[in-house]
Image (tube, grey):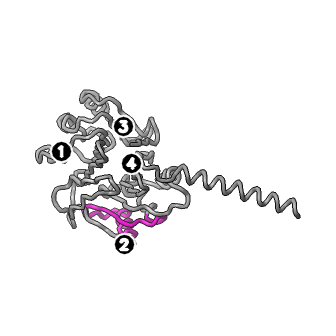
Amino acid sequence: MFLNYKKWLFCLGVMFFVIVLYSGLHWPDKKLHVYFLDVGQGDSIFINTPNGKQMLIDGGAGNKIIYELAEIMPFFDRKIDVVVLTHPDKDHVGGLVEVLGRYDVEKVVISGVESESSDYLEFLRRAKNSEVIYQNDKIDFDFDGVFVDFLFPFDSLFGEHIFAMNDSSIVIKLVYKDVKILLTGDLETDGEKELLEANVDLKADILKVGHHGSKTSSSMDFLEAIFPEIAVIQCGKNNKFGHPYPGVLENLQNAGIEKIYRNDIDGRLEFIF
């Protein structure tokens, strides 16, 4: 009996050590972590601020986002401060339905555009447990030292039925100290042109390439206005669309981008500042 008691104490001590070690690996480290999650053919970006606040932008199509979050969040952490849906396409909203079902989400940001997709309607139903904010409310805010600038759409899309859904994508610029990251959703060339004609400051160090590297996005004028050092393409391995399009890869190279990373080749990506 005494021997079993000692073994029990030893096992308890080992478990406590593992928990403390694991927690330490995920504890706020006063650095900005930006993850481009590997969710297959879809977008998902997770931001962990220097003091541990968390923002998730899009969630891919299925439940792979749940496994990705489990890899980068402590197992006991069931809260996400902000979730942003750039637009209601399945490869952006599908995984967020799972997220809202498993995590306590304080704020949800949407454009307000109308869609009858079952995933989007279920997302809206589950979002009722959170504070829903519409992008057209001009909610640019300082998120724990990370300035989140909502650049596009310019006008309210609340209740609008949009045929070109990709060009309703919320475009975000993250600014932290001297680092700028541009996240473009599935924005296509028409949306890019609107941003250019409005003389929006698009300069960024890192660009999340629009629409998974589709040929309908990433015009040379747009890329030259951003002038990034790094481009990230969120696409799935052997995807049926052939993303990224060879012409887009050529544009990225011609724009002088030094490094091009892809989820289908590089898996999950993490940038630490």
For marks 1 and 3, give the one nearer the viewer. Answer: 1
Q: Residue at x 26, y 28 (%)?
A: 256
- Image coordinates for residue 170, horizontal then vertical, percent: 26, 54
Q: Nearer the viewer, residue 212 or 223?
A: 223
Name which residue type carries label 2.
Lys
| Mark with earlier residue (1, 3) | 1
Q: Residues within 10 Å of mark 4 (few under 14, many from 20)?
A: many
Residue for badge 4: 42
Front residue of 143 and 262: 143
- Which secondary structure lies at badge 1? loop
Q: CA distance from mark 4 to mark 1?
A: 26 Å
Q: Quadrant of the C terminus?
A: top left
Residue segment shown in magenta: 100-127
Query: In front here: 44 or 2?
Result: 2
Residue pictured at 41% horizontal, 42% vertical: 272
The amino acid type found where label 3 is placed reads Gly
User: What residue would you read off at disc 3?
Assistant: 242
Looking at the image, tell me whether mark 3 or mark 2 is earlier in sequence order.
Answer: 2
- In what element is the residue under mark 4? loop
